[in-house]
Amino acid sequence: MIHLTVWRSHNRITAFELSGHAESGPYGYDLVCAGVSAVSFGAVNSVISICGIDLDIEQKQDGGFLHVAIPDNLERKVADNVQLLFEGMLVSMETIERDYHQFIKIEQKQGG
């Protein structure tokens, strides 16, 4: 199962972590994994490209783990754009969870 944990402070996303594998199909045909990967990497790449910031990213080589932390010293407009992009990512993940809840679980926590 894929676990997505989103940390918030003052109702703003400060970090998120993806871990595990969906195992909803054979390797190369796992649509849940492909969807989660596309959404998460698309959001991270969008933040880096559009907002022009460096994120604190930790990833394991074999896949199955991604931790992203947002710097806390961003200008307000940049921080707002980062939030919008990552909130969009979360909406997409919740859509995947709604249809494939047996393969992905989302949890939100304060702090992080």
Image (cartoon, helix red, strand yellow):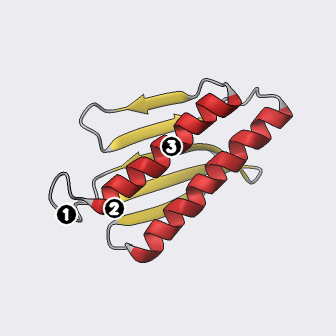
Extreme residue in the right direction: 76
Residue 103: x and y in percent read 32, 67
Number of numbered callouts drawn:
3
Q: Position of residue 35 (x, y in %)?
A: 39, 57
Query: Secondary structure under badge 1?
Result: loop
Q: Which residue is mark 3?
A: 42
Q: CA distance from mark 1 to mark 3?
A: 22 Å
**Quadrant of the rendering where the C terminus is positioned:** top right
Q: Quadrant of residue 63?
A: top left
Q: Quadrant of the N terminus?
A: bottom left
Classify mark 3: helix, strand or loop. helix
Q: Secondary structure at mark 2?
A: helix
Q: Are marks 2 and 1 in contact (CB under 8 Å)?
A: yes
The residues tagged by marks 2 and 1 sit, at their Cα atoms, a distance apart of 8 Å
Percent position of residue 97, x then y: 45, 69
Label 3 amino acid?
Gly
68 left or right of 12 in image? left
Q: Amino acid at mark 1?
A: Gly
Residue designated by label 2: 32
- Determine whether label 1 and label 3 are within 8 Å by CB: no
Is 74 located above or below residue 96 in the figure?
Answer: above
Q: Earlier in the sequence, mark 2 or mark 1?
A: 1
Considering depth in this image, is 24 or 71 the residue closer to the camera? 24
Residue at horizontal 62%, vertical 48%? Answer: 86
Numbered badge on residue 75: none
Could you tell me if residue 70 is visible in this image? no
In front: 48, or 105? 48
Badge 2: how crowded within 10 Å, few (<14), some, or many (20+)?
many
Q: Mark 1 sits on what residue?
A: 25
